[in-house]
Amino acid sequence: MIEVLFILSILTNIFLVWYIIQLLRRFLVFQEELDSFAIKLEEYEGHVEVINNLERFYGDETISNLLRHSKAVVEECKEFQSILSNEEEYAEEEYAEEEYATEEES
């Protein structure tokens, strides 16, 4: 009976490790895509700003509003990126603290 529970426990742990690895891969892909998206948004913002500063379009209210909106979207994207990076740093700090506590107990 105990052998069956032991094998079941091993299989469950293997599955959970596999699942965690899959989640981490998805998270890393998501973060890379978000970084790429942020770069594209910043390029777009720069492009709209250049157009807004052209003599032909200078002072055009529609382009000025588009520029303001672009800046707001870029700021939100940067906020989201900082939240993600802060969570990563927090997880790394927790891991380091747990490792340090384990070493102290030894």
Image (tube, rainbow, N blue to C red):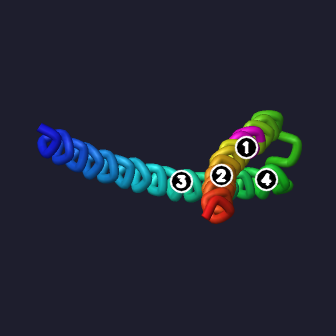
Q: Judge from the rendering whether residue 12 lies leftward or rightward of residue 67; answer left or right.
A: left
What residue do we see at 65% from left, 47% from top? Answer: 87
Residue in front for this viewpoint, 75 or 89: 89
Q: State the mark number for residue 31.
A: 3
Point out residue 48 in the picture as x, y percentages from the top left corner. Answer: 73, 51
Point out residue 64 in the picture as x, y percentages from the top left corner. Answer: 81, 40
Extent of the magenta region = 72-76
Q: State the mark number for residue 49.
A: 4
* Chain-order first, disc 1 or disc 2: 1
Q: For the residue carrying disc 2, how many other residues have a C-alpha within 10 Å: few (<14), some (14-19), or many (20+)?
A: few
Q: State the mark number for residue 98.
A: none
The reply to whether callout 1 and callout 3 are in contact (CB within 8 Å) is no
- The label nearer to you, 1 versus 4, is 1
Q: State the mark number for residue 79.
A: 1
- Provide the residue designation for mark 2: 94
Three-letter code, disc 2: Glu
16 over 43 or under it: above or below: above
Q: Spatial distance from mark 1 to mark 2, Cα to Cα?
A: 22 Å
Q: Quadrant of residue 101?
A: bottom right
